[in-house]
Image (tube, rainbow, N blue to C red):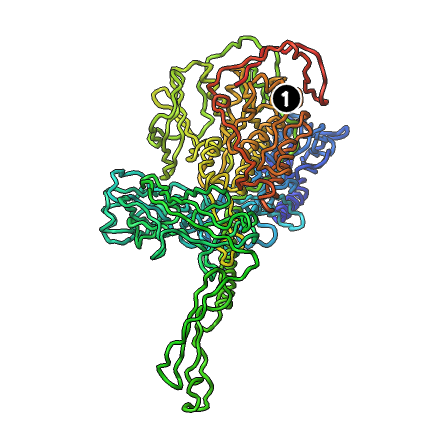
Amino acid sequence: MAEGTRIWLFSVLAVLGVVTVSAQNNFTDPCESPVFQNGMVFEALMENSPENTTIVANMSFAGTAIGAGRTIELSLQDSADKDWGLLVEELQQLRLSLKGKVLDRDGVSGIRDLRFIVRCKTIATDAMVDNSIIATVLDLNDNEPRFVDDPYEQEVIELTPVGSTIFRRLTAEDPDSNENGRVSYQIEGPNDYFEIPLPSTGDIVLKKSLDYEGFQPGEEKKYLIPIVAHDLAADVSLRKSSSTTVTIIVTDGDDQAVQFRPCVLQGDPQEDICGSPLYVSSVMENTETLNQPLTFDPAPIYAVDLDTDVQRPPVIVYSFLAGSPSDFREYFDIGNITGNITLTKPVERTQVEEFIITVKAHQNDNPLRYATADVKIGVKDDDVNDPYFFISTGQSEFKGYVREFTGQAVIVFKDEHESPLLLEVRDDDFTDKVVPEGALRYELTDASGRFDVTDTGYLIVDANRLDIDTQREYRMTVRAVETTTFLKLSTDEATVVVTVLNGTEEGHWDNWSPWSPCNKDCDGIQTRNRTCRRVPCAGDSKDFRSCSVLSADRCTTEPVPQPPAQQTSNEDKQLLYIIGGILGFLLLVAIVAVIVLGRYVTRARKNRTAYEPKEDKIEPWVDLYSSNVTQFENAAFEQESETPQIAPLEEKDPPYPVIPWTSLTVGETVQEYGSLGRIAEGVVNKEGKEIPAVINILNGGASDQDSRDFMNEIDVMCAVGNNINVIGLIGGCRYNGDLYIAMEHAPFGNLRDFLRDSRKLEEYESIRNGVSHMGSQVEVKRALSSLSAGRLLQISLDIARGMKYLEEQGIIHGYLSAKTTQIGEMWIVKISEFWKAQDEAHNNKRPVRWAALESIKTNRCTHKSDVWSFAVTLHEIVSLGGTPYPDKTAPEVFRDLLDGYRMERQNNCGEELYNMIQRGWLENPDARPTFTEIADTLEGMLKGKVAQYLDMEMTDKFKFAEVRPELDDDTVADASITDPNITEVDVMTDDGYEDVSREIRDPVTFI
């Protein structure tokens, strides 16, 4: 009740009291009273009033209730609130009696009023009159507003219009009455993005547009809004308040354009502006191989929506926009979702040699937001002609020269100007008879072993091994071989003759020829020539003079005309050529370096994942052999195993996101598991997006144990959540009793096969520093793999980041290897099979070549044993898929590890990288690095010169690591360790290591 209302009420009661007192003597009945009107009186009482607070000060009965001459008798009759009253008969007063209670008006059970019945009895006549007293309990502002459902959180898409109400659930309750219980809301402090226009409702309204992409890299995309709620008590100084925070999480909206990948930087590389790439491919004329996706360079055709963290979403739609010739659509088709271009009709090269097509990519719900890229598809000749060597007219063999003792990898030259000798090959099948780069390789038959030929046709030699006194002339045979599969081998050969020149001796000229006649006396020019008989010759082969020298008496005294530009010495021209070539080459190298660096920085910036450390917690153990494991995080450590009693699997709410059956398309079966189930390819239609997936199918007739194991794996996948370096769960559904689980699809398969396939380019060679004209050195190197050192270190970093994330989630992998990691879109590596430890708990098998020593001993796995497995996986990466311990059986691996043996360093592995691998193989798990430390170290390596950590250039000492699939495949027969000498084992305890003697509990088997 407002303060003014209370004053008014008390004033009225006071007046009534005065009137009652003044009229008291007018009543003749002793029980008559002016206070009670119609036998009732209303009073006011403040909540929380103290003991003996007066409710009615004087009832003003006409009779007397005290002394010997009393005429009336007063009593408090039974009522619901009788205990709250105290009747003082002699004073005709009613007071408040608390009896240890509190008069509280607030809340559902609060007291709003007190009702009493006072009986007046006339002693002379025994006449009785009952009078009612109703005391209204007034509110005291003694409560503050309390927020309901605190804390508050709301997702808001960045495209939400300004002025929209983004949050309506803000509620604070105040049990006080009237103004004391009414609540008003406001945002504490200034806020640029949000406001509360109506304080009484608490609705939060957006007043400035949100920008998902405007947050800094690694910054959480959310706003924290401080909210204050206060009551509306009349006295502002007495108002009470409370506060809370509303978290607004900004989600990505469709406000960014589509962009083709890979990014082709344009303009300033530091600005990260991507232009359209050019995709290049080719088809064979008259081929019958149709409707197969073409392979493009530098990468497959794909576009990304920049709204989705530069992932390749399936919501991108591809189509042809334009092209030449105009009938290109008769020959090619493009997959709307995949972007794959296929040849649908044979083409003849005589009709068209090249197609130029513009491909359009747009969002399926917004065709106006699109990007374009150019596609060039060449038509290859069906190779009816052989290549042939093109030798200068009048010569039957290539002739070259080289000076002795002038350095390594010197290019042989062909003339007095020391122009490089090119073993030119032509082929009438190609335009202008020029053989495309990469379509040829040269085979040189050189008995001396001193010469070699580059893949571009230049003859090189180690001139430091040449001595003119030992041998002056070398003869050899060269053969050209077409390398593409559709071409035939060449049968054309040529002879090469190389003459060795003295390292310091000048060349030898013939005598000058006679001067040519003058065609004009005064301004004519005479010329003469000479021939170099032994290269290299200093000076020029042509000389000039003015005819005026011969006819000075008939000519004016004008200056003798300067010779034409050809008079510039050949040495000066060669110097200019050299300087120009060097400057051009350095400029080209700088441009390529800037582009490569820009692409790397772009990819690192877009794909970088911020990791926040979690609270420290005790590292969990996972007993990989306990048959009682049902929850991955709470794995049992029991060592004794008995036959488990399997309870029937009960239906319950599915832990996975449910996918409607109509949204799931199941494709071809990839692998069968008998009565248990199968794995198939598939597509999930999720909110209009077609997502490629791997479908795991559990048959409805599977046993309870198999069903329980399968559900345990699903529980692990659900617990892991989403991470760019971990295979994710899309969802699942049941149909006709079968369970279908859709998982993320990795299109490039597992890392082990990916590494082994990269060895195919081991014979690749290139000239790194260009062609040298003056016989200078040229660096010729061979690559070990199609994967660079930087790419392999990035793969290692992806695995470390994925394992770091699993460790932060409390998940122990227990089965990490190159085979259990997958290559996803854009070559992003993803951890898979981290759920497999559930199955391994029942079949008592471990992959010994990847297992940590303590895991083999104790049948247990920890995050530190995962670090050991990571070190073995890193060894696989360095060795390009080599089998660990290829010369040892499973029991030999175990015994050698016990003796301290560790795998040796590969020739291409730097000391620092191998030291990190060795730290992962330390016998004491606590001494091994964490995945956070490993990831930080690999990041540092990628920022430096990667070649010092991993050298991918072919050397004479390098030998590929052995690959033995029968040792690293899951189908290998078990090998039991039965050595009776192995009885002393180290068992991990909470305090560290404890050496105890015991028999190995069960024979341990390995695969």
Above or below for 501 versus 609: below
965 on left or right of 440: right
**Mark 1 Cα shell of 10 Å, populated few (<14), some (14-19), many (≥20):** some
Assign the N terminus to one quadrant of the image: top right
936 on left or right of 198: right
User: Residue 413: horizontal and vertical position, in percent?
Assistant: 47, 56
Label 1 SS: helix
Q: Is residue 696 visible?
A: yes
848 on left or right of 14: left
Check disc 1 and report the residue beneath it. Answer: 897
User: Residue 72: horizontal and vertical position, in percent?
Assistant: 69, 29
Work out which residue is located at the far right of the displayed protein and give it.
Answer: 67
Q: How many marks?
A: 1
**Between residues 475 and 829, which one lies in front from this camera angle?**
475
- Figure quadrant of residue 860: top right
User: Residue 465: horizontal and vertical position, in percent?
Assistant: 56, 47
345 on left or right of 210: left
Q: Is residue 34 visible?
A: no
User: Residue 326: horizontal and vertical position, in percent?
Assistant: 24, 53
What residue is at 26 percent from the left and 44 percent from the top? 384
Q: Say which amino acid is labelled 1.
A: Leu
